[in-house]
Image (spheres, helix red, strand yellow):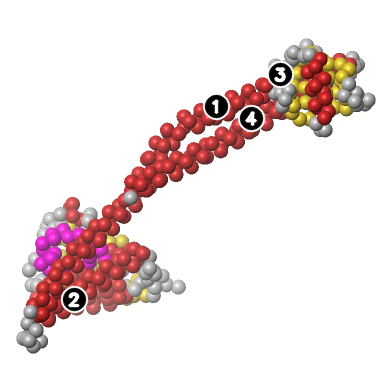
Amino acid sequence: MLKKLRWKFILIITALLAGMLAAALAVQTVSAARQYREETERVLRAVLDRGAAALDPMRPFTGGGLEQDGELRTGIPAFYAVADRWGRVGLALSFNAELDEETVIRAVEEALAAGRESGRLDGLDLRFLIRSGGSRLELGFAGLGWERGAVRRQTLTAALILAAALPGFFGVSVLLSRRLVRPVEESWKRQQQFVADASHELKTPLTVLLADADILLGHPDDTIRSQRRWVEHLRDEGLRMKGLVEDLLFLARGDAGEREGPRGRADLSQICEQCVMSFEPVAFEAGLTLESSVAPGVGVAGDGEELRRLCAILLDNACKYCEPGGTVRVTLEGGGEAVLTVHNTGEPIPAQAQAHLFERFYRADAARSREKGGYGLGLSIAAAIVERHGGKIAVRSAEGEGTAFSVTLPREKRG
């Protein structure tokens, strides 16, 4: 599918670039053709002036810029004719044109029959211009051959330019398609990985649920009390599945843009203090020391429930991956921005794993995560909440320093 999409991009971009160049060349060719026609018309006016000057020596000859030594000089074959109102030719003068009486008479007849002062005689390959001179008509004729040849050469040049540019356009299209398709390809791969990971995570609780259900069905005469253990297993796995599905829906709605931006004000100081209090029993059971330093009155614009979940995710993650006897410390600082830091001591996170921590279903230590009941979605949800609130989340982990997750959130705007 991605390969077909890339080829579509290549063809579309190539066609657009070629179309734009073709349009520019077409405009240039039309403009050049207009200039060639104007040049022929300029020659026709000069031919009429020179012919009139030949009939009337007292009449000055300007030549329209084409005169040399008092004579008309032009590379375009042309001739001048004088006729009466009935089309009878009285005089013809040649300017670089081979003439015969039959051609002159036919040209004059067709020009007069055209019923207009200027135009083309395609049958004779001539352009004409008629000027009234009292009782006579003066007609100038110029060959169209040079004009047609010039337009033909211009068209051929444009076609050669377009043909030469097509390979370049194709190469540019290939490069651009790689850039355009790369985000789609990465998104597609993430989606495939997401579906595979979600299926894998759902498979385990479903297997347990089906196994427990089979055990219960195998003892149809037993009471619920005697089979309480399996019923509790069913309930626990059902709750785990519910939690996983809710997390997936939260992330999916964020991806689809269905969740509106957070509104209202949240007291981040109060939220942090409440989360620390709720995790004190957890830390105590794990043999950890839980410390906090929370600046009072730190308010942010946002959803209080989501920020409470963010704080809980970071604290839960810190307690899970802190060795017994270690310390978990929560710090909240105010100022221009609210900065929440959750730090724990213990083994650092490998540098190569830190870049992937906020990816869905990623586990730096998959075995330990499963032992502790994690799905690898917590930090992804935390990152999504922070992004929705216009903030930033980062991790810093090093040997001897432990691991610290820092969240920076914009402060609420006061009117």
In the picture, residue 12 is in which quadrant? top left
Which residue appears at 45% of the width and 40% of the height?
Answer: 14
Q: In this view, does 247 lie to the left or right of 172?
A: left
Q: Distance between the residues labelled 1 and 2?
A: 75 Å
Is 395 placed above or below 162 here?
below
Q: Mark 2 points at which residue?
A: 238
- Residue 62 in view (yes/no): no
Residue 49 at what x, y percent from top left?
83, 21
- Which dot marks residue 157? 1
Which residue appears at 11% of the width and 73% of the height?
Answer: 211
Q: What element carries label 3?
A: loop
Q: Distance between the residues labelled 1 and 4?
A: 12 Å
Is 157 placed above or below 274 here?
above
First in residue order: circle 2 vs circle 4: 4
Mark 4 crowdedness (10 Å alpha carbons): few <14, some 14-19, many ≥20: some
Q: Name the residue under label 4.
A: 32
Q: Is residue 400 magenta?
A: no
First in residue order: circle 3 vs circle 2: 3
Which kind of residue does numbered mark 1 sit on?
Thr
- Residue 260 in view (yes/no): yes
